[in-house]
Image: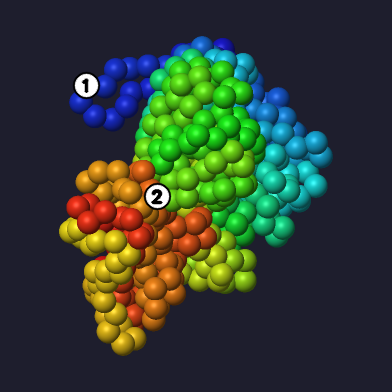
């Protein structure tokens, strides 16, 4: 009588070790879901899109979908669709998904609906790539609908203006509390972005994406921008290393257009700005940034402390008080309180990128442990933020305050005198000027001009030179370097020189308090 072969439902399996429970081989095999179980070929030729999606959709239970060694061609977006789904490969170059579509598109995303949120997902040890710009994806990985999830990926996007990793604020629900590790590459045209956090719909709270931890990014190369942080609060970027970057390593609070604009109606003060044609919601622009775009005071940026229906009150006084010729734009502050610890920028002399480009409204940004070299003519920081609350260097801000007591009328007071090529108040190491603030102990009968020079042989000849003027009838003034003026000071002339000049009717009883701030590297 012939023997009947046992099926996988009849053959038992017992794991090694004390206390193991006997199971069937069928149960054991079903512990792991492989894309090849659903027909994926992994030869880089066959279209594996449907098979991969079927593997993800195969069960409602939490699963790891395994990508064995192979190159998996896809032609449409793969959606995780629900919580607790992870795509797990064998390594960046061992398990690869090659998205191929002439129209572009996204390789991997979370929920199908952009208003949904899924959690505890992941894409791990997988490479997403396509070396053909004509069929490359527009977005490698879209985390917009995912939170509490983990990503460890290598992504290259060659399509012009494509994005490796994209996240957008999503109804206050996501993306947040994600962890991202990556290697990111662009194309030979250097137009791509490594990580883009964009503004989206928001129902309240902090601007999303928020509370994500990004890093290490072991290498980012051939990109226009490594991180484009247009929106986001409380995100941590750690150990970001880039080279061959075209425009920015970090671009902060970039907005394609202003949130409001107009022309001042005049009657401004050192800390107020009026436009009687407006009917703003009270404090709608608190912590936003107003930029004087033309007329008197052009080029100044200031954070807004509060607003009424027709008046803005700024935190810091104007260096040049705007009048009714002053045109302006307002930019909301969507990029706030983000931290960058460990930034390496190297090998970019020919492309001349900026390490940091802070656009109007970028606020409470802190950068530490940066190693910046080979920027060509690019700047360490191009700061148009209007905020004095950012910290661009590891050692933070150093402030010094002096009091000039009753200088008198038509007086010239040299607080820090020059002494030959160097002199004045010496500063060790490399530093970046932040601002100079002047206050008097009462309204002035005539103006007071304070000139703070970094280097140079005469008043106003420093690089940069900050000039703060308290006009008659006022009691405070502020000077902040222009966006291109945050130049590092180093070498043999680290002198800081300070001079005060008063008007003919200044008033002998008035005193001035002058405070200047720099951001320092150690010597």
Tag of residue 335: none
Q: CA distance from mark 2 to mark 1?
A: 85 Å
Where's residue 432, x and y in %?
Answer: 37, 63
Q: Quadrant of the C terminus?
A: bottom left
Where's residue 429, x and y in %?
Answer: 28, 72
Where's residue 17, x and y in %?
Answer: 24, 29
- Give whichever of 316, 136 is nearer the camera: 316
| Residue 395 in view here | no
Residue at x-position 52% and y-position 30%: 274
Which quarter of the figure has residue 293?
top right
Q: Which residue is mark 2?
A: 471
- Give whichever of 383, 511 is nearer the camera: 511
Q: Which numbered disc flags the more N-terminal residue, 2 or 1?
A: 1
- Give whichever of 52, 34 is nearer the camera: 52
Identify whether 435 is placed above or below 229: below
Q: Is residue 70 left or right of residue 147?
A: right
Query: Which secondary structure lies at badge 2?
Result: loop
Q: Which residue is mark 1?
A: 19
């Amino acid at each position: 009588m012939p023997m009947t072969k046992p099926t996988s439902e009849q053959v038992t399996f017992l794991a090694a070790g004390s206390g193991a429970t006997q199971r069937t081989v069928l149960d054991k095999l079903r512990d792991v879901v492989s894309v090849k179980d659903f027909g994926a070929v992994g030869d880089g030729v066959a279209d594996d899109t449907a098979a991969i999606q079927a593997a993800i959709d195969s069960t409602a239970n939490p699963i790891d979908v395994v990508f064995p060694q192979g190159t998996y061609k896809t032609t449409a977006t793969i959606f995780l669709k629900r919580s607790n789904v992870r795509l797990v490969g064998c390594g960046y170059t061992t398990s690869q998904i090659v998205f191929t579509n002439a129209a572009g598109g996204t390789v991997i995303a979370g929920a199908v609906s952009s208003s949904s949120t899924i959690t505890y997902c992941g894409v791990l040890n997988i490479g997403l790539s396509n070396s053909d710009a004509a069929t490359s994806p527009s977005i490698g990985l879209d985390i917009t609908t995912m939170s509490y999830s983990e990503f460890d990926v290598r992504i290259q996007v060659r399509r012009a203006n494509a994005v490796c990793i994209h996240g957008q604020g999503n109804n206050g629900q996501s993306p947040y509390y994600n962890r991202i590790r990556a290697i990111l590459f662009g194309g030979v045209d250097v137009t791509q972005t490594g990580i883009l956090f964009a503004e989206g719909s928001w129902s309240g709270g902090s601007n999303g994406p928020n509370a994500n931890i990004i890093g290490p990014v072991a290498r980012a190369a051939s990109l226009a921008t490594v991180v484009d942080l247009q929106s986001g609060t409380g995100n941590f970027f750690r150990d970001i290393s880039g080279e061959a970057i075209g425009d920015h390593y970090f671009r902060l609070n970039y907005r394609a257009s202003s949130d409001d604009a107009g022309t001042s109606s005049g009657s401004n003060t050192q800390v107020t700005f009026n436009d009687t044609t407006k009917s703003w919601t009270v404090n709608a622009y608190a912590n936003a940034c107003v930029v004087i775009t033309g007329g008197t005071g052009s080029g100044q940026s200031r954070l807004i402390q509060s607003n009424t229906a027709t008046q803005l009150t700024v935190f810091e006084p104007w260096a040049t008080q705007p009048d009714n010729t002053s045109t302006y734009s307002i930019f909301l502050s969507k990029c706030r309180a983000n931290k960058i610890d460990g930034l390496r920028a190297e090998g970019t002399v020919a492309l001349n990128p900026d390490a940091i480009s802070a656009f109007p409204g970028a606020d409470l940004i802190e950068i530490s442990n940066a190693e910046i070299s080979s920027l060509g003519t690019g700047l360490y920081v191009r700061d148009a933020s209007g905020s004095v609350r950012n910290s661009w260097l590891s050692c933070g801000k150093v402030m010094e305050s002096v009091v000039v007591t009753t200088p008198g009328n038509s007086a010239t007071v040299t607080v820090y005198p020059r002494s030959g090529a160097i002199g004045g108040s010496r500063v060790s190491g490399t530093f970046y000027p932040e601002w100079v603030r002047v206050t008097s102990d009462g309204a002035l009968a005539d103006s007071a001009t304070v000139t703070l020079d970094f280097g140079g042989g005469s008043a106003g000849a420093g690089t940069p030179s900050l000039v703060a003027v308290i006009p008659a009838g006022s009691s405070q003034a502020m000077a902040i370097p222009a966006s291109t003026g945050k130049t590092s000071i180093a070498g043999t002339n680290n002198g800081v020189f300070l001079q005060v000049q008063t008007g003919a009717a200044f008033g002998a009883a008035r005193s001035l308090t002058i405070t200047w701030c720099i951001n320092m590297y150690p010597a």
